Amino acid sequence: MLLPSIHHSLQELNDLLEQISDADYAHPCHELGNATIGEHTRHIIEMFQCLNSQYETGVVNYDQRQRNKLIQTNSEFAIGQIKEIQNALDKENKKIELQQIVDGEEIRIESNYFRELLYNLEHCIHHQALIKVAILMNGKLEVNENFGVARSTIEYRKKCAQ
């Protein structure tokens, strides 16, 4: 169920990007501290890319993202990156160590590939919620009401509506 959920969230993002001009994609949103839809999209993409590119070593450091400006300014390029991510997700679960520098000190925490996929899914949904704010403030595009909403919240809402 995890991979289909990730594919669904990434496809929702892809569908949105297919509708947006690069000008709107890179336009600062005052309500988001002048962040752009492109910056949030880049962040989503690069977190998945980090997990994928560092999978073989077994040590993942999300701070080692490329911060590729082309992803945040060119929606067509971003769409291509999303497709590459979707094609690379299906890997075996294995032990992974998360590495990060916190207050000048290196920490390592045990995790695994599936746990990190789940983290990236939740992280993706969080940033999609922020993207949704920018879309709604822009007023030019429509977005699905469930875009940027956690799957558990969607299921809860369904139960409440019954």
Image: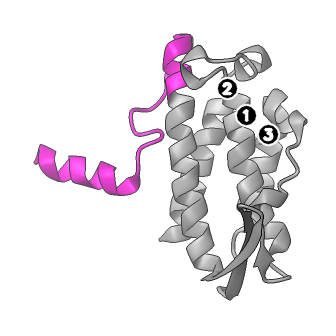
Magenta span of residues = 133-162
Per the rendering, the mark at residue 39 is 1
Q: Amino acid at mark 2?
A: Ala
Residue underneath mark 3: 78
Asked if labels 2 and 1 touch by Cβ distance under 8 angstroms, the answer is yes
Vertical arrangement, residue 65 with respect to residue 43, above or below = below
Q: Amino acid at mark 3?
A: Ala
Q: Is residue 27 left or right of residue 136?
A: right
Q: Which badge, 2 or 3, comes first in the chain's sequence?
A: 2
Mark 1–mark 2 distance (CA, rounded to whole Å): 6 Å
User: What residue appears at the point 62 percent right and 36 percent down from the top-left corner?
Assistant: 15
In which quarter of the view is residue 60 placed? bottom right
- From this viewpoint, which residue is outermost toward the top? 139
Instruction: Tell me residue 139's x, y (percent).
Output: 52, 11
| Mark closer to the observer (3, 1) | 1
Badge 3 crowding class, 10 Å Cα cut-off, few under 14, some 14 to 19, many 20 or more, is many
Q: Secondary structure at mark 2?
A: loop
Asked if labels 1 and 3 touch by Cβ distance under 8 angstroms, the answer is no
Q: Nearer the viewer, residue 124 or 144?
A: 124
Q: Nearer the viewer, residue 74 or 110?
A: 110
Q: Is residue 20 left or right of residue 4?
A: right
Badge 2 crowding class, 10 Å Cα cut-off, few under 14, some 14 to 19, many 20 or more, is some
- From this viewpoint, which residue is outermost toward the front? 104
Tell how many labels.
Answer: 3
| Residue 102 in view in this figure | yes
In which quarter of the view is residue 69 placed? top right
Q: Nearer the viewer, residue 107 or 145?
A: 107
Q: Which badge, 3 or 1, comes first in the chain's sequence?
A: 1
Q: Is residue 54 magenta?
A: no
Residue underneath mark 2: 35
